[in-house]
Amino acid sequence: METTLRTTCPRDCYDSCGITAVQDEDGTLKRLVGDANHHMSQGKLCQKCSIVYNGSWRDPGLRLSTPLKRSGPKGDGAFVPVSWNEALSEIAGKLNQIATKETAAKIYHTHYTGTCSVLGGLYPLRFFNKLGATEVDPDTVCNNAAHASLTYTFGESCEGFDPDTVRDSACVLIWGANPSAAAPHVHEHWLRDARAKVVVIDPIAHPSAKSADIHLQLRPGTDAALAFGLLHIARRDGHIDHAFLAAHVIGWEEVLPDIEATTPQVTAELTGLDAGDIERVAEMYTAGPALIWLGQGLQRQKMGGNAYRACALLCAATGNLGKPGSGILFLNGPNTRGADVDYVVAPELADGAPDPISQMDLADHLQDAGKTRALICWNNNIVASNPQQTKLRRALGREDLFQVSVELFQTDTTAYADYVLPAASFMECEDLLFPYFHNTVSALNPVQAAPGVALSNAEIFRRLAHAMGFNDPKLFEADREVIDHVLENSDVDVGFDELKKIGTKRVYAKPRVQFESLTFPTPSGKIEVASERAEADGCWRAPKPHADAVAEIGRIRILSPASPWTLNTSYGNDEKIRQRMGRQAVRLNPNDATRLNIADGQTVILRNAVGELKVQAQVSEETQPGVAVVLKGTWPMFADGSGGNINLLNPGDRTDMGESSCVHSIEAQIAPAD
Ligand SMILES: Nc1nc2c(c(=O)[nH]1)N[C@H]1C(S)=C(S)[C@@H](COP(=O)(O)OP(=O)(O)OC[C@H]3O[C@@H](n4cnc5c(=O)[nH]c(N)nc54)[C@H](O)[C@@H]3O)O[C@H]1N2
Ligand SMILES: Nc1nc2c(c(=O)[nH]1)N[C@H]1C(S)=C(S)[C@@H](COP(=O)(O)OP(=O)(O)OC[C@H]3O[C@@H](n4cnc5c(=O)[nH]c(N)nc54)[C@H](O)[C@@H]3O)O[C@H]1N2
Ligand SMILES: [Mo]
């Protein structure tokens, strides 16, 4: 007789699927499938998770099962097994030595998207706060431009519209996101079930764009100009909500001259769009009620923060805020369910902690022995995910940099570690998850034993705290106590035992209205279209109708968005996934291919000031002339002669605000390989 257990996928994905684990009589896990009762998975996992959760993630030969100590040169990947005692006491000894002789601020740590669950993703921060280590700000490699931009405008960035309110909407703009890859169940269910008209604004004709009512295929980095163009039309046609502006918005008069100047004709020239299409979208959006889902793609541009502010302005000026069916969504943080995860992080343990640094500065800092003595990586794979791949590798090769990785697998990053510590995956731990799209809460249940002596992230850092001689009780709090505390102090009215049975719970009976009180946690309490804080930080005081120039002659703009087969770089080591991904490729528009004399399937070299990448050309109508796509996610060690992945060409330039990554602004020359 088979039995089933419920758990939840805690990956960095909008879907946060419910999972059913099927076990046989003796409790052995047979397979993981989508939970039929879950509103997103509806009985089916996405193709990538279904493969790895029934493949590499449960393969005892691939998973790390014991602590390892380096036995060869850094980067070679030669290790010998050691006991937990040996590993932890040597690591603790080394860290204590650095902290006393120099300063704990020279111990750096990076972490990010391994698991987005409450304990697995946040609990170790207690340890690092107590230690006084320097955090490499995770969001700066992903979306900190958006956080900064929305914080200037609304006072906070993690309160979005409730996706359930789509039933009250007439129109949804999907702006710079690709749900078909990055949120497969949102694409399949949420969008399909919405009665609203769907507009996709994206330089690429991906499957979600193709199935939309309108696809505005603009040039990359021209979104702010489009938002101002839509505002121009809204104003011309009498769709500006002046009462809302007067009551709740600061700075309208400062953006008015630019709105007046951004006529449909000007907008069409700046964005490469058709003026008639812009008019149609303006009409649909301003008729409302309408939603704007702001993807991460459009803020990964040099002026990405400005683009987000321009979109926020569009939403506020047309009165599409504060009522059902309207609003803007970047992310929904645990705060939209009344939960305070600061309890888990315990920032109070940090006594005069050093400022975090940007991921854009990591390679530079690691090269400098005066700044860095040790690096601990957990929940991420910096060699594959970060910019400046070559420089970063060189820095990680420093013999005097003490390195620890906490991982599920041997990766391009663990190859540089002095110690690799085996982590238990979400399948082996009890944990809590606040999805960042829907206002739900989910439980994670252990559905199998961890391989060998692998331990959860939380337990590893409890044991390391003990080995260091720390004695603050907060460093040792039990998992269940933390979970109960977070749940009890939230809007969730279910206990953890019950949550484990049902898997996922909707927190509100009817859709939550974003910013319903129309008070905003900005200095003025209003929406700050013009922001003194932005100005003080050296940013534009108010958004402008900026549009990036097209790439110089001889260069091509390269976007590197989410691949449907990987989750960031996770799964890139699974053999079945690698088969489906095929050779690393660059997608080119047929016009570019003809102009550059490149044939479909030919090997080409992409080259710029920081690197050279050898990939296969794929001629594709999905892209537009001058814009190429190389998907993220390839592991450098599996890049078959490419030399690395797209981050080899990523100079680590930063966005206009938030010290964040503008990974979709990469430019390179392209030429046949021979
Ligand atoms: N060129 C380019 N680069 C990009 C992007 C892009 O669009 N283009 N996107 C960026 C974005 S959005 C992000 S968020 C970053 C993501 O960058 P990363 O956070 O580095 O994401 P992954 O590469 O998936 O690495 C997560 C690692 O955590 C491990 N892991 C999984 N579960 C656990 C666990 O429970 N415990 C521990 N200790 N480890 C675990 C996985 O095995 C995996 O190796 O990459 C960025 N890099
Ligand atoms: N399968 C899969 N799912 C994932 C991930 C993954 O790696 N794989 N990563 C997860 C993570 S960490 C994140 S942050 C999210 C990211 O997922 P998304 O929010 O979808 O972000 P991206 O993948 O960067 O790119 C989305 C779209 O932005 C477009 N874009 C690029 N430049 C511009 C521009 O200037 N303007 C506009 N309007 N669009 C532009 C790209 O063409 C792309 O189609 O997905 C999560 N989900
Ligand atoms: Mo991300």
Image (cartoon, rainbow, N blue to C red):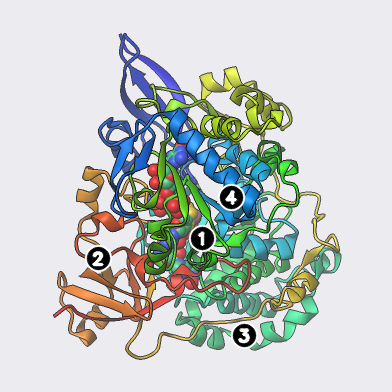
For the residue pair 390 and 537, the one nearer the viewer reads as: 390
Q: Earlier in the sequence, mark 2 or mark 3?
A: 3
Do tag 2 and tag 1 residues touch (Cβ < 8 Å)?
no
Find residue 519 and report its horizontal and vertical position in percent: 82, 54
Q: In the figure, residue 48 lies in which quadrant? A: top left
User: Taking the image as drawn, is residue 161 in sight?
Assistant: no
Q: Earlier in the sequence, mark 2 or mark 1?
A: 1
Disc 2/disc 1 C-alpha distance (Å): 23 Å
In the rendered view, tell whether residue 529 sits above or below residue 487.
below
Q: Residue at x 48, y 71 (%)?
A: 652
Where does label 1 land, which residue?
Answer: 141
- Disc number placed over residue 262 in the picture, else none: 3
Find residue 294 and report its horizontal and vertical position in percent: 56, 60
Q: Residues within 10 Å of mark 1 (few under 14, many from 20)?
A: many
Q: Residues within 10 Å of mark 4 (few under 14, many from 20)?
A: some
Left or right of residue 625, residue 107 in this image: right
In the rendered view, tell whether residue 245 sits above or below residue 350.
below
Q: Nearer the viewer, mark 4 or mark 3?
A: 4
Q: Which kind of residue does numbered mark 4 sit on? A: Ile
Disc 4/disc 1 C-alpha distance (Å): 27 Å
Q: Nearer the viewer, mark 1 or mark 3?
A: 1
